[in-house]
Structures are given as C-alpha cells and as structure tokens.
Amino acid sequence: MPSIELENKKTILYDDIGKGIPVLFIHPPGMGRHVFHYQRRLSQHMRVILPDLTGHGDSSRVDMNIVTVKYYCEELISLLDKLHIQTAIICGYSAGGMIAQYMSIHYKDRIKGLILFGGYPAVLNPIFQLEHKAGMYLVKQNSRLLAKILAVSHTRDSKLRKVLFDHMNKAQVEVWFKYYNEVMNSNIIKDLKEISVPILLIDGSKSDLTNQYHSYYKRRTKQLRIVIIKRTNHQVPTKRWKIANKEIEMFINKISKRNAASKQENYDK
C-alpha cells in the first residue's frame, strides 16, 4: 500500500489503481477508503485514487484541533501534488462531498469534474442536523456501535461489513467527531456559483434529507446532471454501485471527449 508524507510530517496511505483520468474519492467521517470498495472496479477505465484522510484508517493520527474542511482540502491537494497530478476529477460521498465542493470552489485550476454521492452544501434541516449530532454523540459514547451500524447499513456482504467495521475502528474518535461537526457547521450555498466544472450528483430516491438540497445546485450551477436511483437510500456507493459506476463512466467519458475537442480546437488555431 503506497503512502506519502505531507509537509507536516503526517502520512497518508492510499490505493492508486488503474490508468487514465485520475479520480480522487473522498470518504465521509470515520469510514475510510474502503467505503469505495466497489468503485475500485472503475480502475478498468480510469485511475482510481482512494486515500484515508489523516485521523482515519491507515493514515497518520492528527491533532483534532487542526481538522477542518479547509484542512482536509489542502491535505488532498498536497496528495495530488505528491502524485504529480495537475488536474483530477473528485468524488465525495455524503459529508466527504463538502470537502470535494470546497476543492472545486477554491482550487478551480486543479479540478476537472465533481461527483457527489448524496452531496449537500449545508445542513439546514433540523432533522438533518439531528442526524449529524446523533453521529457525533455515538462517536463519543460508543464508536464501535456506530461503526457496526454504518457497516450493516452499507452492505449485506458479511466480508465487506467486517472490512468496513475493522477499518472504522482505526479512526481517531476525536477526529471522527470533529469531521462531523465541521461539516454540520459549514454552509457553501452562496459559493456554489463558483463551481465551474461539470457536476454529477447521485443519490437514492429514499434519501430525503439530502435530496431536498438539489434545488440549490439547480439554481446556482450550470453543468449539472442529477441521478436519482429508485428504491434506494443514501448508501449508493455500496448498495447501487453498478448504476453509480456506470454513471461515473459516462460522466468521465463526456469530460474526456470535451477535453479532446478543446485540445483539437486549440491545435487548429
């Protein structure tokens, strides 16, 4: 398993598989890179990069006081730098989508496309806030129980459940808590207009708490495709991975063709 050392001497461990357009996947609080287990199959068509953010999984422990959305954004930009990747497509799942959106807004020259699994620009709904607070409460009171709940809710595959459960139990409890808290208190609705790259937003039809935010993207972004998968909750990357992966392939192909056409146009000039 490869790793890189950041300027602050922290180490990020990651999987880097496949060739082609690089796609960086960003996990939600606690879960780590294995939540994208089925997206590894995309490596047949593109370069798939799956890091554990610091304080998670196999990466270095980190002081919780420095953990913010901005911090993780800069950490991932450093990872791209170390891998000599000038531009990439980024994919954030759930709260990980907040980091992905922040990167798209503040590092426009590094991002070619944005994919969101159940992404949202803020946590405004009281029930949605309660869901985040419940996660934070469980992290502090019984993180192993939360890990079990999350593993069970993501897959029926007993082997994958164990992988997810074991990996989540490597996370720093205080960092897991802080990540939840930082996302819950973030609001980038006004900044959505700054996202200039194509966006693919995928979620389940039963995921009411995140689907309610789609209107913000429709009003403030231009290149947007929203895919709602029927009879599905929030856990799209594991529960409806075949449909999700196909949508990602089509999204990447469209961006590739657009980039090729742009290069040809510049060449002709």
Image (cartoon, grey):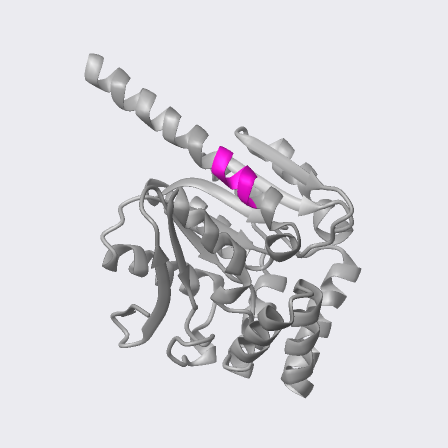
> Taking the image as drawn, is residue 100 in sight?
no
Residue at screen point 46% across, 55% down: 40
Residue 51 lies left or right of residue 133; in this view the side is left
Quarter that holds the C terminus:
top left
Query: In this picture, is 25 found above or below 201?
Result: below
Q: Is residue 187 left or right of residue 56?
A: right
Badge count: 0
Q: Nearer the viewer, residue 158 or 176?
A: 158
Q: Is residue 28 magenta?
A: no
Q: Is residue 231 left or right of residue 196?
A: right
Residue 22 x/y as whole percent: 35, 47
Give how far across and how far down residue 243 sits, in percent. Answer: 61, 42
Q: Looking at this rendering, what residue extends furthest in the top direction?
A: 269
The quadrant of the rendering that contains the N terminus is bottom left
User: Depth check: 238 or 207 in front?
Assistant: 238
Q: Position of residue 155 (x, y in %)?
A: 66, 64
Quarter of the image for residue 79 reads bottom left
Query: Against 154, is 40 above or below?
Result: above
The span shown in magenta is 245-250
- The part of the image, by quadrant, that contains residue 10 is bottom left
Residue 144 sits above or below residue 27 on the image = below
Which residue does the image show at 51% across and 79% down from the upper left?
A: 171
- Front-most of 137 and 12? 12
Main SS, magenta region, reads helix
Q: Is residue 161 visible?
A: yes
**Looking at this rendering, what residue extends furthest in the bottom direction?**
141
The image shows residue 48 at horizontal and vertical percentages of 39, 52
Q: Residue at x 63, y 53 (%)?
A: 122
Residue depicted at 51% across the width and 62% down the height = 27
